[in-house]
Amino acid sequence: QAQLVQSGGGLVQPGGSLTLSCAVSGSIDSIMSVGWYRQAPGKERKLVAVETNGGGTVYAESVKGRFTTSRDDAKNMYYLQMNTLKPKDTAVYYCNVQSSTAPYEYWGQGTQVTVSS
């Protein structure tokens, strides 16, 4: 079964940048969407951005203009570029892939992003 392996989190000062990576280990057929979510301590997991096939990318209002998703299909990699980071962006970030074939949904293991001076 395919897995999503994340990397790239860490500690950054306010105003700084980070890029998160999500590598597909194995193969996922019939991908319908690739998304990024985050979960702050004591809070629910929330959508950050999602790219759907043919539908473009939708961003949460809180990250519009600061975060950008990208992908390298040749390498089976997905990225979340985060700029102008704020302390409220501190959370565990997860990549997510949804497919039309079983098991239909994949999650990365999560990576901590901490924005603090």
Image: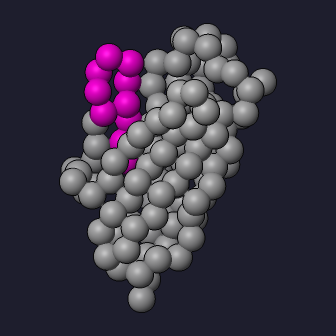
Q: In which quarter of the image is the N terminus?
A: top right
Please give left or right for residue 110 compared with residue 79 in the image.
right
* Furthest residue toward right: 1
Q: Quadrant of residue 105?
A: top right
* Furthest residue toward front: 74
Please give left or right for residue 78 compared with residue 101 in the image.
left
Q: Which residue is drawn at 61% across and 33% down?
A: 75
Residue 102 on the magenta segment: no
**Magenta: main secondary structure:** strand
Q: Which residue is drawn at 37% across and 74% down?
A: 16
Q: Which residue is drawn at 47% across and 31% down?
A: 34
Q: Residue at x 35, y 79 (%)?
A: 14
Q: In which quarter of the image is residue 102?
A: top right
The front one of 94 and 67 is 67
Q: Looking at the image, is 74 positioned above or below residue 46?
A: above
**Magenta residues (range):** 48-57
